[in-house]
Amino acid sequence: MKVILAQPRGFCAGVVRAIDIVERALATCDAPVYVRHEIVHNRHVVDGLKARGARFVEELDEIPGDAVAIFSAHGVSRAVESEAADRKLRVIDATCPLVTKVHNQGQRYASLGRTVLFIGHAGHPEVEGTLGRITGTVHLVESREDVLGLPIPDDTPVAYITQTTLSVDDTRQTIEAIQKRFSDVIGPETRDICYATQNRQTAVRNLCRHIDVLLVVGSANSSNSNRLREIGEELGIPSYLVADGRQVDPAWLVGKETIGITAGASAPDVLVDDVVGALAKLGPVEIQALQGVEEKITFRLPRELLEAS
Ligand code: SF4
């Protein structure tokens, strides 16, 4: 069996920064460290940080007043921020700078008096955070149909923004529908929204030209991992999302010679190794990595943590 690894795959700079923030907080803060929501959407990462002392909660009211509260990489609404300030929690914000960039874009468009159309998936923490940061009129749209059904006149000045981890192609279709329906539209270049999403999607497209089956390593609630699997399916390759090697079903591989592996932006390399290990138990494997973009982007840590450590 031949195994081809996508390049790039796995951790992005926003995820590395968020995990680093929790690790440094655990090492330098004398108070208990609480994290609101999964810091990144990966159970293995969350369990590892839990084992080192981090406590994960869903809402701020579960955090005692003397504790450190870390906001996850997905960002939070202004209401959550205000609640933390009212309760005088010591907050460390691990929101990815690229998510913050989308918040700022949305607020800028709303301040120009435009109706903001936010392309994203309802219920995702990033979407809830972004919706709760824009003062003005915002509509969440998930598809072309949602755009057609918007209860606003076609000459409304609108601006679109998008969730960072969507499929660039899906987003393009929704943007085309917005541009077709409305006469006054502005928005950012979608390829600039998140370099990691763009690079992993380009890499999986390249990978799919060489493989019979695609395995995407990532958690079921990871938006960008799900998009990678969907791209494989759209390209006609049987594609499966697996959290680790235990979830690989040998039946998927019957009669297949070349297996492609990629990983979502929140999946660590150790889980890719685990999946390769599971394949190796089924028979000899020859491993190869595809050529791809080499990422050198890093994001600065919050100043208080840099100073403390
Ligand atoms: Fe930031 Fe993009 Fe990573 Fe999301 S996928 S954490 S937006 S770098």
Image (cartoon, rainbow, N blue to C red):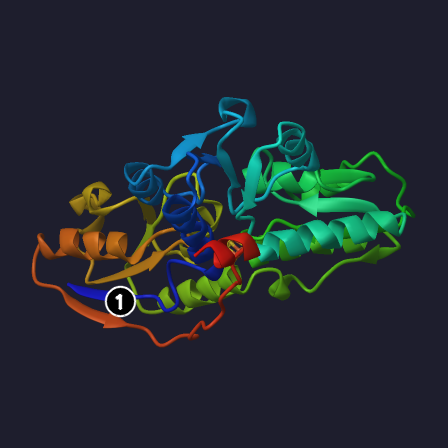
Question: In the rendered view, does 24 fall on the left or right side of 52?
Answer: right
- Residue 242 on image: x %, y %: 30, 45
Image quadrant in which you'd find residue 207: bottom left
Query: Left or right of 248: which side holds 58?
Result: right
Which residue type carries mark 1? Ile
Residue 306's place in the image compared with 296, above or below, is: above
Identity of the residue drawn at 50% across and 26% down: 63
In the rendered image of this protein, does residue 203 appear above or below residue 291? above
Q: Work out whether 246 lies above or below 210.
A: above
Q: Residue at x 32, y 51 (%)?
A: 217
Residue 81 visible: yes
Number of callouts in the render?
Answer: 1
Please state which of residues 252 and 66 is positioned toward the viewer in this rendering. Answer: 66
Which percent across, then down, holds residue 50? Answer: 33, 37
Quarter occupied by the N terminus? bottom left
Q: Residue at x 34, y 59 (%)?
A: 262
Residue annotated with mark 1:
4
